[in-house]
Amino acid sequence: MGEGRGDEDKMNLDLPARLTRRVVSFVSRQKKGSNLRCSGLALFFGTLKSSYECEELRYPPENQECLRVYWKRYFYFWGSAQVMIRILFLGCLWLSPVVLSAQLVNIESKRMQTDSLRFALNGDFSLNHTNNDGKQVTQLDMALTTQLKSKDLRKLYFLIGNYRLIDSGAENLQNAWFLHGRFNYKFRKLHWLRFETFIQGQYNQLLVVEQRNLIGAGLRVKWMDKARFTGYAGNSYMYEVEYSDRAGTTDYNRRNSTYLTVSYAPKSAKFSVANTVYYQPLYKDLSDYRILEQFRLDVPLAEWFKVFTAYNYYLDRETPLNTGEYTSNLNIGIGISL
């Protein structure tokens, strides 16, 4: 930055560039004969993107070292602050009352395709408020998902936590929670095949089966791996315990769980879509089955921030009351990733 720049040029400089100008000005007062011109840095949503171009730098080695130390500390400070802001924001969302759409939850939509990244953390949040002639209903939706991979990237640990509360002011219209833990092992020679085992607990006061606990294991196959399209299929054995206060029953069932999912992400990375279908029949009675269909659209606005839309349809062919039951919903919200 030369000393001949005008006031208008000074106003166009962002914070990092202004700080650089002050440091260089200070050094130039200490050491004469300096001539430095730089373009500055752009700061967008806490992400530093460097466009720093130095045409000429004539400083003694000790001053150059001072500048290197200065910028190293600056990047470290903003990088740490950026992570802390996101963690605090996610923590605030987690403390809010939150969401669950149905007792059969689409695990596929929560998986994280992070390649060589060993740790990932995602959070989804949505809010809906309705006022119908003075009758108000407020709903907050949130999901917290985390994933950890081993050093060889072949073992994966996956955890989901959800909670939903729909409040009408006079009473809670819905109270639901969901916890899911999963272990995934990738075979060395059969890179398209995975073994997975899982455990799950869930509660929804609106359904006939208020609470369901289950454990299961099975195989997962990557049947399509194109540049923009990805497809997975899986089949698992599940042992579950279902509690129904309305029917006064406790059922111990063995079910098969089969799913198929297809996702698409364009080269521009401006959006991604995914569709998943689950089919879960009883082994002893194939006419008693559950189906879940979900279509999801994600639009990233920054590397760590996105908006999403998801449509869910859930069908329970036969409940403990010997009746069918279905639910459907459309969610629009925001999500963050760390």
Image (spheres, grey):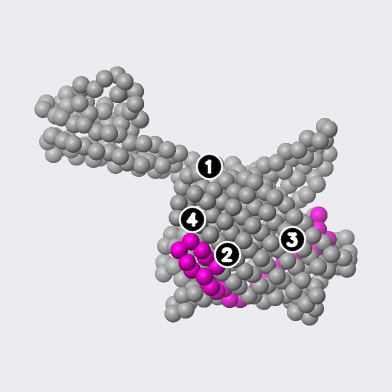
Give the extent of the magenta segment: 206-231
Dot in front, 3 or 4: 4
Percent position of residue 175, x then y: 76, 50
Which residue is denoted by mark 4 in the rendering? 266
Dot in front, 2 or 3: 2
Distance Cα–Cα, label 2 vs label 1: 33 Å
Which residue is denoted by mark 3 in the rendering? 314
Question: Circle 1: is it few (<14), some (14-19), or many (20+) Cα within 10 Å?
Answer: few
> Which quadrant is the N terminus positioned in?
top left
Main SS of residues in magenta: strand
Q: Which residue is drawn at 21% across and 31% down?
A: 37
Question: Circle 4: is it few (<14), some (14-19), or many (20+) Cα within 10 Å?
Answer: few
Which residue is denoted by mark 1 in the rendering? 88
Q: What residue type is labelled 3?
A: Tyr
Q: What residue type is labelled 1?
A: Leu
Q: Which residue is drawn at 59% across and 48% down?
A: 308
> Which numbered tag is attached to residue 262?
2
Percent position of residue 152, x then y: 41, 69
